[in-house]
Image (cartoon, grey):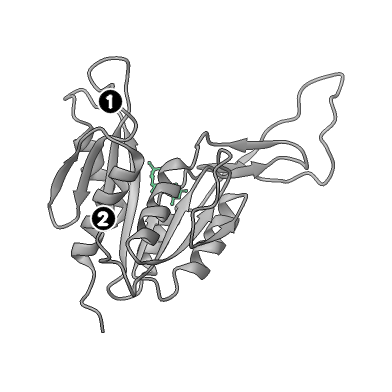
Amino acid sequence: ALPHDLAGRRVVVSAGGTREALDPVRYLGNRSSGRQGYALARVAAQRGARVTLVAAHTADLGDPASVEVVRVGSALQLRDAMRDAVRGADAVVMAAAVADFRPVAHAANKIKKGAADPPPLALTTNPDILVELVGAREPGQVVVGFAAETGDESGDPLHHGRAKLDRKGCDLLVVNAVGDGRAFEVADNAGWLLAADGGETELPSGSKALLASRVWDAVAARLRPRA
Ligand code: C5P
């Protein structure tokens, strides 16, 4: 049986990939099934938390039981939904794949095929939602990020992970080593859990639910005592 250690807590999880509209029918997007975020939401609910899942585009996943699901499309919509949802939350996990860029303009009508050159694609940078949430966090709120890292020349995805943890300012960072076809080929749902307080835990290959459990263990250990 799962521990009920998140009873009385409110947590927010983002999942899926954002879609940045070019016109009413086309978008730029990130590939993301949303499965890890859904597993995080499901496991948190099973452990007693009140859960809000902010879901961008995902595979066809059923809504997790006893979870409030808020659907969004673009990174800017995800940002707005997260700002609302994190009010009063004890923990926030950013598992969504946020598009780094969006088209500057969203055409009201479908962009037509012209005879000549293709239209230029002007992009602008999306906000880093995780960094913003860290900057605006309420006292005691635990913030978790995700990172898919390849190794560097020293062969160490953890090196990148540690730098990202510092840059983002979150409490915990789940680092998934993504393969370059050589030494770092590992299952998607394995990696390391890095903590701002210096902790470093290996996450052995296993189900997304198992990885979710390890993340909530680490979050639970950092929550303030209940008021
Ligand atoms: O910088 P990178 O995209 O590798 O960081 C990944 C982490 O940052 C994830 O937790 C992701 O949800 C979050 N992120 C974000 N806003 C962005 C880009 C990434 O919140 N624009």
Question: Is residue 168 shown above or below 154?
Answer: below
179 vs 61, left or right, is left
What residue is shown with label 1?
A: 186
Q: Nearer the viewer, mark 2 or mark 1?
A: 2
Query: Where residue 42 sits: x, y (%)?
Result: 41, 54
- Foreground pick, 114 / 66: 66
State the count of labels.
2
- Residue 156 falls left or right of residue 134: left
Quadrant including the N terminus? bottom left
Reading the chain from its start, which is encountered first: label 2 or label 1?
Answer: 2
Farthest-out residue, bottom: 227
Judged from the image, the secondary structure of the residue bearing numbered disc 1 is loop
* Residue at position x 22%, y 45% in the image: 193
Amino acid carrying mark 2 in the image: Ala
User: Which percent across, then down, holds residue 72?
Assistant: 60, 54
Quarter location, residue 4: bottom left
Q: Residue furthest front?
A: 1
